[in-house]
Amino acid sequence: MPFREPSWTVGIEEEYLLVDRETRDVIKDAPPDLMTALNDIAQDLVRPEFLTSQVEVGTQVSQTIGEARADLARLRKVVAEVAGRYGLAPIAASTHPFGQWQGQKHTNKDRYNNLARDMQAVARRLLICGMHVHVGIESEELRIDLMNQASYFLPHLLALSTSSPFWRGEVTGLKSYRLSVFDEVPRTGLPEQFESYAEFKRHVDVLVRAGLIEDASMMWWDIRPSAKFPTLEMRITDVCTNIDDAASIAGIYVCILRMLYRLRRNNQRWRKYARMLIDENRWRAQRYGLDEGLVDFGKGAVIPCTNLLDELLDMIADDADALGCTEEIFNARDIARRGTSAHRQIATYEKSIAEEKSPEEALRDVVDMLIEETVRGL
């Protein structure tokens, strides 16, 4: 039976690190009334994250990417204004340039207390932030089918988003070091392939009955059916420092899903590739970002990311037109031209070193760049 066309609604979640404006270091503990002050303005759209030095924002359910961007801009502005009262600032970056995970505190909630107890040092190292995009797909079966196919495109989205080239003051050589940290957590990475929603649920229920997880929300794959909403949630991306980059990636993601839905409606589908192959592109995006290309499995060759992006944008152009996000998705060409946050962070650091500043001063300059860019264009 054909599936009814999904609503294609969009919600964007972003996590930010809070930094001390004077030292530029990530804080160890948020002021006790910070969340109260945030919720007085933004209600339940700003939430504590695993670490008390983090906050998470989540847009309302949006009908278009433009609506989601506007809501995200409002939430970034609220967090920046309220944090500023305490001498703090948010940075939309997936790692802090020189922050240390030792000494960080986790939020005192049952769920987080259990995670800290079960995962020990693996959880304590999670001084990282990401961006998640929810797309409304009401059919459970269609969510699974599109998850299976959309996994192919996840490395492409990661490459466009990278913002974590530093870890504990070190230039890691990776554009997304965040994934190296997060991959230590169980039930992360690319999802399994499932033939149906019932098969997915059956596998999750094995872990629930064994007492290993509470529910499907503890499957932290790069893409997953949301346990809370009727959505397919993309989770692979770093948080984008530039808000327009976030809107662009969210737009590309929803258009990819609509393109795959159109194929299914016409009795076609995207070819499924083995996880080992997609993992190669995932690693290349993590290591190089946009710089060294991804593998075209059909051609058996590494293709420049700009070429792959042009092909992808051509494939989803009709979907962008139908969903009213053509301008947002074509901004991805600007990302490819000027680079991601990771590129700008490294360039800022190298410029400061060339000016004979110390590595510590150069890292603080990177934080200043992140503070400014996080609120640019709001």
Image (cartoon, rainbow, N blue to C red):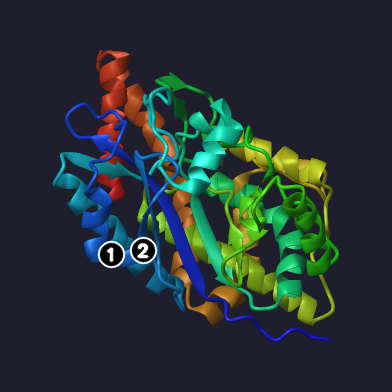
Residue 224 visible to an observer of this rendering: yes
Residue lying at 47% horizontally and 35% vertically, measured from the top left: 164
- Left-right relation of 93 to 300: left
Residue 283 image position (x, y, % from top left)? 67, 36
Q: Which mark is residue 255?
A: none
Quick one: SS at disc 1? Answer: helix
* Image quarter (top left, top right, bottom left or bottom right) of the N terminus: bottom right
Mark 2 — residue?
Answer: 45
**C-alpha distance separating marks 1 and 2:** 6 Å
Q: Residues within 10 Å of mark 1 (few under 14, many from 20)?
A: some
Question: Is there a contact, CB below 8 Å, between mark 1 and mark 2?
Answer: yes
233, 349: nearer the viewer: 233
How many numbered marks have been drawn onto this rendered protein structure? 2
Residue 328 image position (x, y, % from top left)? 45, 66
**Amino acid type, mark 1:** Ala
269, 22: nearer the viewer: 22
Q: Is residue 346 above or below residue 107?
A: above
Q: Residues within 10 Å of mark 2 (few under 14, many from 20)?
A: some
Q: Is residue 18 above or below residue 6?
A: above
Residue lying at 65% horizontally and 56% vertically, measured from the top left: 215
Mark 1 — residue?
Answer: 42
Quick one: SS at disc 2? Answer: helix
Residue lying at 86% horizontally and 64% vertically, measured from the top left: 195
Residue 176 visible to an observer of this rendering: no
- Left-right relation of 149 to 13: right
Residue 270 image position (x, y, % from top left)? 79, 64
**Amino acid type, mark 2:** Leu
Residue 319 image position (x, y, % from top left)? 60, 76
